[in-house]
Amino acid sequence: MVRSYSSFLCMPMTAEIRHDWSIEEVEQLLNLPFNDLLFRAQTVHRAHFDPNQIQVSTLLSIKTGACPEDCGYCSQSARNNTNLEPERLLPVDEVLEAARAAREKGATRFCMGAAWRNPTDTNLQKVADMVKAVKGMGMETCLTLGMLSREQARALKDAGLDYYNHNLDTSPEFYGEVITTRTYQDRLETLEHVREAGLNVCSGGILGMGESRRDRASMLCQLSNLPSHPESVPINLLVQVEGTPLYGTEKLDPLEFVRTVAAARIMMPRSHVRLSAGRAEMSDELQALCFLAGANSLFYGERLLTTDNAETDRDKALFARLGLSMEQHVETEKPPQGRACHRV
Ligand code: SAM
Ligand code: DTB
Ligand code: SF4
């Protein structure tokens, strides 16, 4: 007891912004006694955020399935035998209707996802029109369309896009076990293009794909050692979809998920850490631990892209039980003091 407490005290408690994490250092964080790790994460969290506010985004799949990529977790890959009905790019009015419904429920950001390796320039123009329309409703906008060139990222910025989501998914070491049709470097380059265009970066990964604790540490190093931390860091728990290669993977210890959220919070103190896919299968108590570990963003609404999300009534009840409020502010990353809030 005494030994772990003293080693815990030796670790800095300040919310320093660093880009030089080593995998070993992150492993040390992940190896801390659970209470010490959560205390540190909560301390860092409180230095930067109101701990009782949650940023709320809603997702919509604007183009579903028939994707040429071979991501081993994904229901939308044409190579996986899932029972998914492919859909063409949705018309703008359908997207706007969904955005309006999301806004009425309290979401401040609307995230649109497409099952593409990368958008064609024609499709990019159509999506840019969606961004303009959603933005015109007063919501923040986010897209995830696959790889982007420098020019495409700029065109989306010009259309008024706020965030671009592109996940690293896992560590560079484990990556090849999950995806072979695009490289880790491709992903890093897209993130560079997005950042260069002046867009906010949303990038994180998936846990529970059979990776090791070291892989989780390595993925967090990649994210926090980017030239700027992503403003938003989605931590997904693998949603196991029948017919995908990762279906049947041994389930991750839920406390390991919490530990990883805590490490993300400590390493990227000013980022919103999003408790993303996998909430439908999590208990309220597990989600509460994730919030304590510094998660302060989530997807709200009955669906993610192709799978069910936690139900909104359940989320409302959970927010009320935990005394959490939805962030209402639409502007990007401001100090916590300025944020308005909205009780559910
Ligand atoms: N096609 C684009 C791409 O892959 O870049 C955008 C959409 S893709 C569905 C966005 C992210 O969702 C993936 O990078 C992955 O991290 C996450 N994701 C997809 N399927 C998932 C699953 N079954 N469980 C957890 N996360 C998943
Ligand atoms: C992210 O990190 N998680 C979201 C979003 N970015 C696009 C996607 C989750 C997808 C979960 C599986 C599905 O519904 O298809
Ligand atoms: Fe396609 Fe994206 Fe799914 Fe990979 S994660 S198969 S790129 S939709």
Image (tube, rainbow, N blue to C red):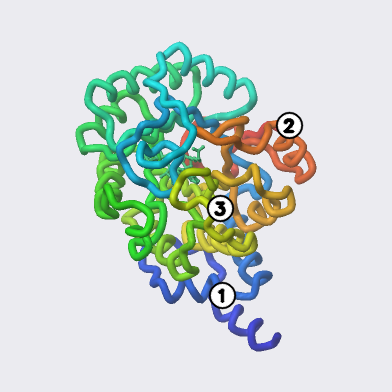
Q: Is residue 186 above or below residue 41?
A: above
Q: Is residue 190 above or below residue 40?
A: above
Establish whether ligand 2 lies closer than 8 Å to the Cβ of label 2: no
Q: Quadrant of the C terminus?
A: top right
Q: CA distance from mark 2 to mark 1?
A: 36 Å
Q: What is the residue that sits farthest to the right in this orientation?
A: 321
304 vs 43, left or right, is left
Closer to the chain start, of discs 2 and 1, is: 1
Neighbour tally class for label 1: few under 14, some 14-19, many 20 plus, Cα within 10 Å: few
Closer to the chain start, of discs 1 and 3, is: 1
Residue type indicated by callout 3: His
In percent of width and height, residue 183 lies at 26, 52
- Residue that mark 3 sits on: 48
Element under disc 1: helix
- Residue that mark 1 sits on: 31
Q: Nearer the viewer, mark 3 or mark 2?
A: 2
Neighbour tally class for label 2: few under 14, some 14-19, many 20 plus, Cα within 10 Å: few
Element under disc 2: helix
Element under disc 3: helix
Residue at the image position 46 percent from the left and 26 percent from the top: 85
151 vs 279, left or right, is left
Q: Is residue 25 above or below residue 247?
A: below
Residue type indicated by callout 2: Asp
In percent of width and height, residue 49 lies at 59, 49
In percent of width and height, residue 182 lies at 27, 48
Q: CA distance from mark 1 to mark 3?
A: 24 Å
Q: Quadrant of the N terminus?
A: bottom right
Residue at the image position 54 percent from the left and 47 percent from the top: 240
Residue type indicated by callout 1: Asn
254 vs 65, left or right, is right
- Residue that mark 2 sits on: 313
202 vs 151, left or right, is right
